[in-house]
Amino acid sequence: MSPTLVIVLAVVVVPLIWSILISFQRLKLINIGTANVFGNFTLSNFERVLTSKSLWTSLGTTFVYTFGSVVLAISLGLIAALVVRKPFRGRTFVRAAMLLPYIAPVVAVTFIWRIMLNPEFGIVNEFGQNVLGWADPIPFLSEARGTWEFLGAEIPVPTALLTVIAFEGWRYFPFAFLFIMARLEALSTEPEEAAMVDGATPSQSFRYIVLPQLLPVIGLLAILRTIWTFNEFDDIFLLTGGAAGTGVASVRIYELLTIQRNVGGAAAQSVILAVVLVIMLSIYLLVLRRRGEKV
C-alpha cells in the first residue's frame, strides 16, 4: 500500500493542508515563495470573505448552477439510456455517438457553442428568427436578464445562467448515460413482462418496477455530479468568463488569485467552499440513509 499512500499524500493531503495553512495568512502572489506558512496566522481573510457580498452572490449562483446542471444531466442520461435499451439496427453507433459531448475537448465544444449562440451569425438565432419568429436575436452568453412573454406577462429569465446550465447538462449527460445503461442491462425483464401481462402500462412499469431499481445508481450519480459541478470552472470560464450573472464561486476564487493577487483570500474562500460542499453532501447522504438506500 505504500506507493499508493505516498501518491495520495503528495497529490491530495499535502496540498489540502497547505491551502488551509495559507488561508489563515495575509499572502500575496508576489511573496508566496518566500513566506513562512507556519507563522503570522490571522482570521482577516475569512472575515473579509464572509463579509463580502460577492461571496454570497457567487454561492447562490453556484447552488442554482449545480442543482440545474445535475438534474438536467441525470434526466438526459436517463432518457438516453431508456431510448437505446431495446435492440434496434444501429444501436451500437447511437450509443457511441452519445459519448461525444463527454469525450470531446472542452475548448473545442465551448468554441462551437459560442459560435452557434452568437447573436450576429449564430445558427441558433438564425433558426429562431426565421423559423420560430423571434423578433430580435438573443445574446445567450452575454445577457444576464432577459424577458419571456407568456400570456401577456413578461417573466424575467437569467439567460446566460440558463445557457451554461444547458451546456453543462448536455456535456455531462453521457456520464449518467453510461451508469444508468449499465444498470438497465443488469435488470431482469421478467418483472416487467409479468406487469405487462397483468395490464400495466409502460409508464406504470417504469415507475413501479424500473425506477426503484435505478434509484441507488441515480443517487450515486447525484453525489458525484454535485461534487464536480460545484467546483466547475473551465466550462463557465470558457463560455462567459463568469460575466452576465454566471460568476460561480470557483470563478470568484480565480479572480481573487489572478486579478487581486490575494492568495490568502482565495485559499480562504476555497476552504469555505469545501466546507459548504461537505455539509451539503452530508445532508444528502443522511436523507438517503433514512430512505434505506445504499450509496
Image (tube, helix red, strand yellow):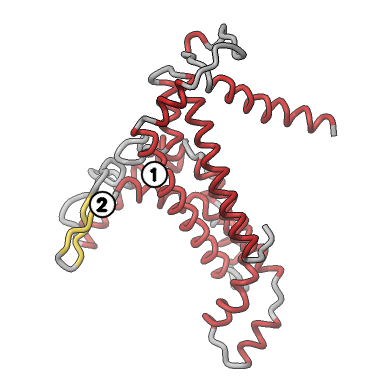
Where disc 1 sits, the SS reads: helix
Mark closer to the chain start, 1 or 2: 1
On screen, residue 2 above or below 88: above
State how far apart marks 1 and 2 are (Cα).
29 Å
The answer to whether 200 appears left or right of 266 in the picture is right
Percent of width and height locating residue 140: 29, 47
Residue 125's label in the rendered image is 2
Percent of width and height locating residue 12: 67, 30
Residue flagged by tag 1: what amino acid is it? Gly
**Residue 246 position by quadrant:** top left
The answer to whether 288 appears left or right of 63 in the picture is right
The quarter of the rendered structure image containing the C terminus is bottom right
Residue flagged by tag 2: what amino acid is it? Asn
Residue 60's label in the rendered image is 1
- The residue positioned 54% from the left and 12% from the top of the image is 40
**Residue 154 position by quadrant:** bottom left
Q: Are marks 1 and 2 in contact (CB under 8 Å)?
A: no
Residue that extends furthest to the top in the rendered view of this protein: 34
Relative depth, front residue between 1 and 169: 1
- The residue positioned 36% from the left and 30% from the top of the image is 52
